Amino acid sequence: MSLIAYVNGGFVPLEKAYVHIEDRGFQFADGVYEVIACYNGQFLELKAHLERLVRSCQAIRVPLPATQDELESLIRETYTRNKLDDAMLYVQVTRGVAPRIHAPAKELRPSLIITARELPAPDDEKLLNGASAITLSDIRWQRCDIKSIALLASVMGKQEAMSRGAYEAFWLAEDGHVLEGSSTNAFAVINDVLVTHPLDCHVLGGITRDIVLRIAAANDIEVCERPWKLDEQGLSECMISSTTHAVLPIVRIDDKPIGDGAPGPVTGRLRKLVLAEISVLTSA
Ligand SMILES: Cc1ncc(COP(=O)(O)O)c(C=O)c1O
């Protein structure tokens, strides 16, 4: 059976889900997006995702294509129509269709598309043994807090990681501190403290990052949001977080082992705690 997508006012089979070639998302990457997990009909932090979408739209001055309540019901309907159990909902808003001129016309109707697919899960081998990452100078723009569809730098980062046999690329600031992954937030355990870059325009405020920090603090894991470097004394573990990974251990970076090169105890504990929290948040 075909997957069903929502495109600008109607539900259509995915094979017939098209937008116009003059959509500004296609021509200028002039849009924003969200990726939301749904477990057996229960959405994870749907309100937080919608609020981030609203903030992203406001930041690029694109009017919301529907009210927050209407968006929520369209997202729920897309999930229901696709008859999936655990699903990943993709929501994209662009400025709309117009002749290709940089300056956006005032009266554009924003485009809204929503798709649903099976929720991808990190593979068991990576969960058991950990994954590897490389570091790259951050070549992205200065507003990484906006969840923009302009993801060419992230694609290039991921491509470079893959070509070196690694799973993720960590963006480094000019002074060498770790910002985040190409599509994930990055954390380290340094002298038993869970450390991650603070929220500013150099990182995306991940919804999973919030869950990780909240759950860590609630379980007596000390948390500190500050810039950090890979060569800091006492750094024993690294991990990434995102909607599709929850928490995943990173055990090698630039071909050097982190700690003893195996997933560490804090990462293991946090992954369990975060998965338990996800079950609570998504129980009927
Ligand atoms: C650059 C970046 N950082 C972090 C994340 C994680 O965000 P979330 O936890 O909301 O999935 C993503 C997800 O796409 C991302 O692209």
Image: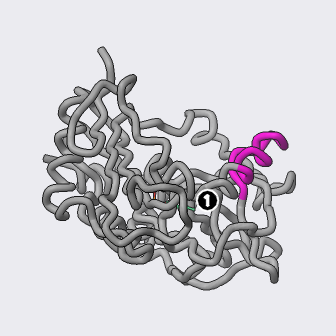
Q: Nearer the viewer, residue 207 or 138?
A: 138
Specify whether residue 233 is in view.
no
Please indicate whether residue 152 sits to the left or right of residue 19 in the image: right
Q: Is 24 left or right of 249, judged from the image as shown?
A: left
User: Could you say which quadrant of the image residue 163 lies in?
Assistant: top right
The quadrant where residue 193 appears: bottom right
Residue 63 vertical placement versus 165 (above, below)? below
Q: In the image, which residues are magenta?
A: 156-169
Residue in the picture at 49% in, 42% down: 21
Q: Give amino acid for label 1.
A: Met
| Dot 1 beta carbon under 8 Å from ligand 1 | no
Neighbours of disc 1 within 10 Å: few (<14), some (14-19), many (20+): many
Residue 139: give x, y in percent of width and height.
75, 67
Residue 278 visible: yes
Residue 130 lies, in percent from the top left, at 66, 46
Q: From the viewer's perspective, tell me whether residue 75 is left or right of residue 61.
A: left
Question: Picture coordinates of residue 110 (x, y %)?
Answer: 33, 58
Q: Nearer the viewer, residue 87 or 104?
A: 104
Taking the spot 63% from the left edge, 40% from the top edge, the residue there is 126
Name the residue carrying label 1: 239
* 264 or 42, nearer to the observer: 42
Residue at 19 percent across and 64 percent down: it is: 68
In the picture, the quarter occupied by the N terminus is top left
Residue 150 higher or lower than 140, as above or below: above
Q: Residue at x 81, y 83 (%)?
A: 175
Residue 112 lies in the magenta stretch: no
Q: Secondary structure at mark 1?
A: strand
